[in-house]
Image: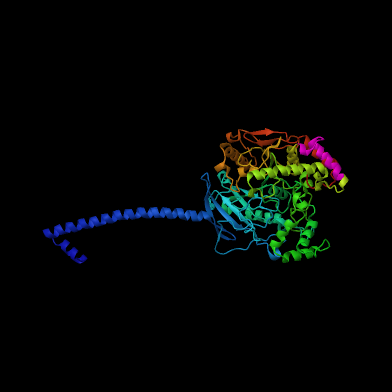
Amino acid sequence: MSDSKICRILREPTLYNLTLGIVIIVILVLILKQGYISGNKTDTTYEKDNQQLSNETKEDTCTLVELPDGKLRGRKVVSSRNIGFYAFQEIPYAMPPIGKLRFEAPVPPEKWDGILNATSNTKTCFQYINFLHVPNWRETQTEDCLYLNVYTPVCPSSGSLLPVMFYIHGSAFLSGTGDYDIYGPDHLMGHDIIAVTFKYRLGPLGFLSTGDNVIPGNYGMKDQVLALKWVSRNINYFGGDPNRISIVGHSSGAASVGFHLMSKLSKGLYNSAICHSGTPINPWSYQLHHKRIAHHLAELLDSSFNKNASSEEILQFLRSVSAEDIHSVVYNFPKYLLDHMEIQGFLFSPVIEPEHGEAFLTENMYSAIKEGRMNRVPLLIGIGSEEGFNKFDGTQNEKDETSVLSDEIQKWKDISRELDLNPGSMVLDNMNIDEEQGKKQVGEVIHNLYTHGRLFSDNLGITVKYFSESTFTNAIIRHAELQSNYSDVFFYRFSYETPELNGIKPDFEGVHKVAHGDDIVFIWRFRGVDVIERGSPMDVLTSDRYRTLITNFMKYLNPTPTKSPLLDYVIWPKVRPDKFQFLDINGTITIQNNLRDKRYRGWLKIYEDMARKPILTF
């Protein structure tokens, strides 16, 4: 029936027409009502779809960041504690240091088109030993490795300005990486901070030096500076505060932090510093014989090179060979140099450069700290209770636990026997004593400081103590002591033992089992070890406490700004030159003051009376 016919029928006043008209009206009303109901259903469905679309759009917004250099896409991650955060991985902070950029200061990256995939880590820098057990570490090594990762607990577009942890990985300037599988930020994300990890050049590619302006060295340190500048310029796009950046590191990473304290290139890029188990005045942190090592490297690659080769010839040659070849010959260095790096300086490590525009370090580290010539920011610094448990060869992960333990005990027996037979081997290069008779005399004084006329072989625990103090704790305590004259310094000792980590440590008399690096797993999900997920309630509590102290310092420049039940209501005192108090982190946390003991004072006297000036490290 047409619309016009319906209208004509409705206008004619017959009973049929009236009845038909009523029926048609009812039908129309029902149709309209049904349409209204359907419309409501459609609207409801649309609202649900729209809500889902809104959530997806929000997720897209939070994982998509636009920087001045270009756009990048990250991913959302949920931790074992159900803490969500956003991960942006493998962001370039420098041009690949290849070709003419090898053995040069890093150059900022070029802009990119499109959206950069920042959801995984695929590259590592060339390295010597797989200290950190990096998966597929040989296959992923490349010169094109200058990338960083940003982890944020807030949507980058939220407008937040959170404090930032700029973390420098350790492993002797020869190994390591800042990648997610090694340094998982999962539990730090519950503390309202942003974490940044990154990679920098290692070994000869990062630290070779001819001692002049041809190959001045410190390229790995200059990578760190450029990464720090990148963070300062870009972290606000991720919800971070560029005015609250804490530089943090462990072992050689902590030494790096200390070097940044005295470098003019780093000044103004951070407002606080945290050093875990390392300082630039540790004896291993500086390479005194870098010129000889550079010539030896070239000679290992081409026997026609010798000590008479010019720096220009070495540079030209080393740029012509592959990075794989340069890296591989490190294994052929004399065994003595490789075996004694802890006490004589890591093979490739920071050096004092001649004055030039891009110089990272140009003066004596010990004097700079002692005389306050540094960036005077608040410092949190500390040690593990037994740093000497660090004599690993990088292959222990390939053996069963019993075999590792047996090897460890035998290793300490061999070391003890060597110290007893040759006390002069305990004289560090930084004492500047060359002649054998002088070394023997000083070595006997050091030997007696620990054995009191007996032998190291009689008590292997004393040997561990010797290595703990001579290679790590003495210098770290001394750094804190000296810097406390110029800035706020908070010192800790991490003494908490957990079965999670004690499997490969011998039971020696008077020795704790908190080895070098054990505390890292209480901050990061480190190398797959998650104490929150796998540990005991006390492991979890200790981890929560440790992270709270660190992140409090980042936020307030004070690890205990107020009394807290989590921290046993303890207020952590600053180090004073006349009163060295520290926080001992164990099953409980307590204030103690017994670090500057008789042996520490004995070392001070040895350096004062017997070492030849100038002293670079301690």
Q: Position of residue 161 (x, y in %)?
A: 58, 49
Q: Position of residue 168 (x, y in %)?
A: 66, 50
- Judged by its main secondary structure, the magenta piece is helix
Q: Is residue 67 above or below residue 153?
A: below
**Residue 15 in magenta?**
no
Magenta span: 438-458
Q: Position of residue 8 (x, y in %)?
A: 17, 64
Residue 104: image quadrant is: bottom right
Q: Nearer the viewer, residue 554 or 88?
A: 88
Residue 296: image quadrant is: bottom right
In the displayed structure, does residue 506 sit left or right of residue 23?
right
In the displayed structure, does residue 151 sit left or right of residue 221?
left
The C terminus - image quarter: top right
In the displayed structure, does residue 151 sit left or right of residue 512?
left
Q: Is residue 23 above or below residue 448?
A: below
Residue 604: image quadrant is: top right
**Residue 441 in magenta?**
yes
Q: Residue at x 64, y 36 (%)?
A: 586
Q: Nearer the viewer, residue 195 or 135?
A: 135
How many numbered badges does the structure rendering display?
A: 0
Q: Give the colour scheme of this rendering.
A: rainbow
Residue 470 visible in the snapshot: no
The N terminus - image quarter: bottom left
Q: Position of residue 3 (x, y in %)?
A: 21, 65
Residue 611 visible in the snapshot: yes
Q: Furthest-left residue in view? A: 15
Q: Is residue 329 above or below residue 433?
A: below
